[in-house]
Amino acid sequence: MAVRWDSLDKRIFALALPALGALIAEPLFLLTDTAMVGHLGATTLASLGLASTIITTAVGLLIFLAYATTPIVARRLGAGDRRGAISAGIDGVWLALGLGVALGALGHIATPTLVGFFPASAPVTQGAIDYLQVSWWGLPAMLLVIASTGVLRGLQDTTTPLYVALAGFSANAALNAVLIYGLGLGLVGSALGTVIAQWAMAAVFVVLLGKEARAHQATARPGLVGIRQSAASVGWLLLRTLSLRIALVATVLVATSMGTPELAAWHIVFTVFSLMALALDALAIAGQALVGLGLGTGNLADVRHVTARLVRWGFLAGGVLAVGMGLLAPLLPLMMTSDAGVRGALWPVLILLALTLPLAAYVFVLDGVLIGAGDGRYLALSGLVNLVMFVPFLWLASQVEWTISGVNLGGLLALQAAFGIGYIGSRALTLGLRRHQDGWMVAGATR
């Protein structure tokens, strides 16, 4: 029997609202950290922007650990195999730990090379290196958190990750305040506070999953078959995520080439966009869980209903955030930096960002639906197409120069238009086409 519309709304928001809290907790505290560092000067803020781009790219590339785990667990849960769902999820957590240790070690070695890839000034470069050398120690913990969150989402539980996120990122903000200003560690103090909070969150998730495994007699030991299956299922999602991260890094490269004030401004714009994107991603996460569950039970009618309703809520949420962002655009620069030139350039770019949020909401919702369906191959290939379509817009943005108060405002506006309209628009086109096909809906405990 198809789910009634009113009941469907309840199911969506029972998952989406806690997911929203968990998702926006991190960028909200990142905004707090950015504001703390921002008052240390434009050079330090630019260093944070450069280092954050590298570390978030590494973590973002591995977000598939949650995106792949959620539908795998949800499908098995929908098929009535909760024990198998938990075991599959724990295998994904072991995979996350192994990848985190390996990539953290590689990051330590490659930090000077990675930072040197960006044409920043010597002080900005050195600050970014100092920040990263501390931050890599937290990478295994952050991947454990990501994978564990994916397991709980697949089990239709988005409330527990909310509580862990609120506690962890609150501790992060408090630690950073003490370490940055109280102990005078500056940018390095910000990195150290984040690492401590990440490991505390990871420890909590390990305890919670261990209790879940014991309650349902699921093994907590790594299963080689399960790990191989998890690794195989994430290949296409890795390619999809890689194309997205390339697009994001490309915008930072263009901003870096404009100069230090422009890079500092773009870091704030990117941080605000991340907050808005993750807020909208709450509906996508509900879509991942509900679509995976629906396909596991074989109820394709429910899957269609979920998709249609998520799209409607997505446009509404995007519109509400657009209005809110437009109203806050003149105020945010005052909170985020003390540099007058950066402040003056920020608010027009934030206005343009606000106008693109409804389109971004449509993209995020459909992305979540297709991830929940396990349609990684299409997402990967369309991601490459989107990247090719983005290149001309990005090149045009790099050619624009309209300087006001020492900041290339025209270049920043063109860069935001290239990303928010050119790149997001191309994703809306390819995902919208896929939505109206039937090939992505494959029923069963596995795809």
Image: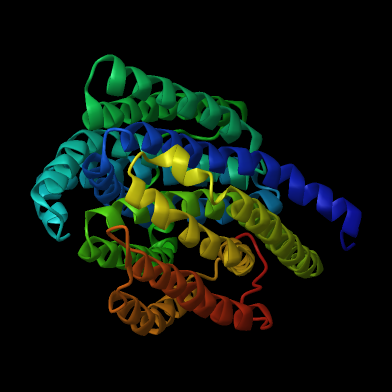
Q: Out of 317 and 97, give the one closest to the viewer.
A: 317
Please give the name of the residue rendered at 12% of the width and 50% of the height, measured from the top-left corner: 110
Q: Out of 347 and 418, give the one closest to the viewer.
A: 347
Q: Out of 346 and 222, give the one closest to the viewer.
A: 346
**Would you place residue 334 above or below residue 401 in this image?**
above
Horizontal arrangement in the rendering, residue 368 relative to residue 299 (left or right): left
Quarter-wise, where is residue 280 in the image? bottom right
Q: Position of residue 391 (x, y in %)?
A: 34, 81
Please give the name of the residue rendered at 51% of the width and 48% of the height, measured from the top-left corner: 275
Horizontal arrangement in the rendering, residue 178 relative to residue 367 (left or right): left
**Would you place residue 333 above or below residue 371 in this image?**
above
Q: From this viewpoint, which residue is outermost toward the front?
A: 405
Residue 212 visible in the picture: yes
Q: Position of residue 325 (x, y in %)?
A: 60, 53
Colour theme: rainbow
**Would you place residue 297 above or below residue 427 in this image?**
above
Please give the name of the residue rendered at 30% of the width and 74% of the height, measured from the top-left corner: 401
Quarter-wise, where is residue 369 in the image? bottom right
Please give the name of the residue rendered at 53% of the width and 45% of the height, measured from the top-left corner: 150
Residue 378 visible in the picture: no
Work out which quarter of the rendered image holds the N terminus and state it: bottom right
Q: Position of residue 100 (x, y in %)?
A: 29, 43
Q: Out of 189 and 378, give the one closest to the viewer.
A: 189
Work out which quarter of the rendered image holds the C terminus and state it: bottom right
Q: From this viewpoint, which residue is outermost toward the top?
A: 182
- How many labels, in total? 0
